[in-house]
């Protein structure tokens, strides 16, 4: 049956559904970038809280600033903004329907509707999942990229902005003028210090057109740092069919693993739901959790996805079935990444690495190599290259980390070892391809990409390791390079 409010009571008994009165929910959160991850993670925590009869004044209004977001809005509006979450546990699948989302702002070029929604006094949190590369941050200096064409547009047109951040600034301008007060801005992206990065982007953008407003935002809004963790594959025909096996037609179901973690600072200037009652962790030391997750899980994803793409392996669980790739992950994480990761309460880096290895190996999760390898120019700069710098500073091992960069360069050449073409999968794919093809004959051209490596290429130890590996890969292949690293 088609998923809707009217059919909730008719769902099969084995499908969990909202026990709360959806008509009683009022808005409290606007979430920008409403994709699968948000619905399987942040929205799920709120759903669990509402299932206990709490937080009905924290309903979520979805939003987006890209044309494609309008398609998602139409899909969800047609089913009353309900979402089917399907947990893919090796011991058995289960499904539940969540209902915490109660609307989706119309997607407009000038973002007028989004600005008006965020200016509503009922909105106390604006959260975002806009990808790691979506914060207009220089990947090397980590400073604000004021020269980006989108930022220049928003600076010249502050009342009709193009970006989510411009819309946030405009909404806060309205709130300040009307004496409504600030809201919390909450990043849910995989960035070390994501709250501080979000603060930098919003305050820096505001300062370009209204320094007084920028000061007000910086003083009164809060930007809690947070770590988010749950593997959530993209939705395709298989996921749509899987929802039907549970007896419903959902135009946008979400599959996810049987693991979630959400760790955040308790810094919410206008209140928050009691997420800690349903498993979230509030702490003053988010950094340690962030570092462990970003370096081992997100960095580990890049370690395995790039050779898998070159070797025509389709999914992450298949990567872990490949003896060379699994052994490569295990060795690099254990000997080159973990030494630069601190323990957190109840979890050492070694224990976390074992947990991640099990999660990556879940055969029920059809998480594609292509999804994980997407936007490597942001993910390597955020997840892998900082570890290389730390390892060099500590005179630690970098052999496998340098190999990861050589394999990425091989992937960006644009063909797999079987001759098939790697379709564009990065916002700067053309630039990466040009550098990778030139580096085939002159390896140093690859790390001359200062927008990615900064001055790292000037480190002779890294440059030598990288050049040796890339030369070996082109002469003998990726499998041979992995075997040599593993001493097989």
Image: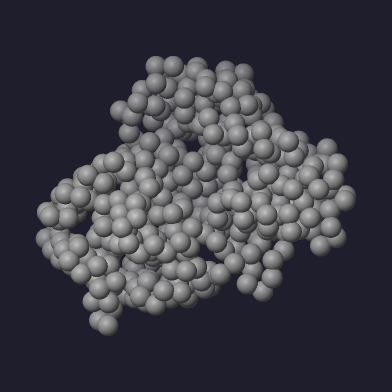
* Residue lying at 22% horizontally and 51% vertically, measured from the top left: 436
Relative image position of residue 43 (x, y in whole percent): 66, 48
User: Residue, x 21% and y 47% (percent of image)?
Assistant: 435
Residue 332 in the image: above or below residue 423: below
Against 414, is 162 above or below?
A: above
Question: Residue 88: x and y, percent?
Answer: 64, 64
Q: Residue furthest right?
A: 9
Q: Is residue 63 left or right of residue 387?
A: right
Left or right side of 450 for 89: right
Q: Residue at x 41, y 35 (%)?
A: 201
Relative to 300, is 119 above or below?
Answer: above
Q: Residue furthest front?
A: 419
The image shows residue 381 at horizontal and vertical percentages of 32, 51
Residue 396 vs residue 238, the one in the foreground: 238
Viewer can see residue 345: no
Question: Is residue 333 among the parts visible in the rendering?
Answer: yes
User: In terms of depth relative to the viewer, which is nearer, 455 or 10?
Assistant: 10
Callout count = 0
Between 411 and 467, the residue placed more toward the observer is 411
Q: Residue at x 76, y 38 (%)?
A: 80
Q: Is residue 251 left or right of residue 363?
A: right
Q: Quarter holding the C terminus?
A: bottom left
Residue furthest to the bottom in view is 488
**Color scheme of the displayed model:** one colour
Q: Position of residue 478 (x, y in %)?
A: 27, 67
């Amino acid at each position: 049956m088609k998923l809707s409010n009217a059919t909730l009571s008719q769902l099969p008994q084995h499908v969990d559904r909202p026990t709360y009165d959806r008509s009683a929910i009022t808005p409290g959160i606007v979430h920008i970038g409403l994709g699968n991850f948000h619905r399987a993670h942040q929205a799920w925590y709120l759903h669990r809280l509402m299932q206990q009869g709490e937080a009905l004044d924290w309903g979520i209004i979805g939003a987006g600033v890209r044309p494609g977001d309008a398609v998602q809005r139409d899909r969800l509006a047609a089913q009353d903004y309900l979402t089917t979450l399907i947990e893919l546990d090796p011991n058995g699948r289960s499904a539940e329907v969540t209902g915490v989302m109660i609307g989706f702002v119309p997607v407009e070029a000038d973002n007028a509707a989004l600005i008006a929604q965020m200016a509503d006094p009922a909105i106390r949190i604006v959260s975002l999942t806009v990808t790691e590369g979506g914060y207009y941050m220089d990947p090397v200096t980590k400073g604000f990229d004021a020269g980006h064409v989108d930022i220049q547009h928003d600076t010249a047109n502050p009342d009709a902005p193009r970006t989510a951040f411009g819309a946030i600034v405009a909404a806060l301008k309205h709130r300040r003028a009307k004496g409504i007060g600030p809201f919390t801005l909450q990043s849910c992206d995989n960035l070390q210090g994501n709250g501080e990065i979000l603060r930098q982007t919003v305050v820096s953008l505001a300062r370009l057109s209204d320094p007084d407003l920028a000061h007000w935002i910086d003083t009164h809004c809060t930007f809690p740092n947070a770590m988010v963790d749950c593997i959530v594959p993209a939705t395709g025909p298989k996921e749509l069919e899987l929802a039907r096996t549970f007896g419903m037609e959902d135009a946008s179901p979400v599959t996810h693993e049987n693991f979630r973690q959400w760790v955040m600072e308790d810094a919410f200037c206008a209140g928050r739901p009691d997420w800690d009652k349903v498993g979230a962790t509030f702490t003053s030391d988010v950094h340690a959790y962030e570092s462990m997750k970003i370096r081992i899980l997100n960095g580990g994803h890049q370690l395995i996805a790039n050779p898998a793409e070159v070797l025509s392996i389709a999914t992450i669980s298949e990567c872990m079935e490949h003896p060379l790739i699994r052994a490569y992950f295990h060795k690099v994480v254990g000997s080159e990444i973990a030494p630069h990761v601190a323990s957190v309460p109840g979890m050492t880096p070694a224990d976390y690495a074992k947990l991640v290895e099990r999660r990556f190996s879940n055969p029920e999760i059809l998480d594609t190599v292509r999804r994980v390898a997407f936007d490597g120019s942001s993910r390597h700069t955020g997840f892998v290259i900082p570890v290389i710098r730390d390892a060099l500073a500590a005179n630690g091992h970098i052999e496998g980390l340098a190999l990861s960069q050589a394999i990425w360069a091989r992937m960006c050449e644009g063909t797999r070892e079987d001759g098939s073409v790697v379709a564009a999968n990065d916002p700067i794919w053309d630039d990466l391809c040009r550098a990778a093809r030139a580096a085939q004959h002159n390896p140093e051209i690859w790390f001359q990409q200062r927008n990615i490596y900064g001055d790292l290429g000037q480190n002779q130890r890294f440059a030598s390791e990288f050049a040796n590996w890339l030369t070996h890969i082109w002469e003998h292949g990726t499998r041979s390079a992995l075997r040599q690293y593993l001493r097989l």
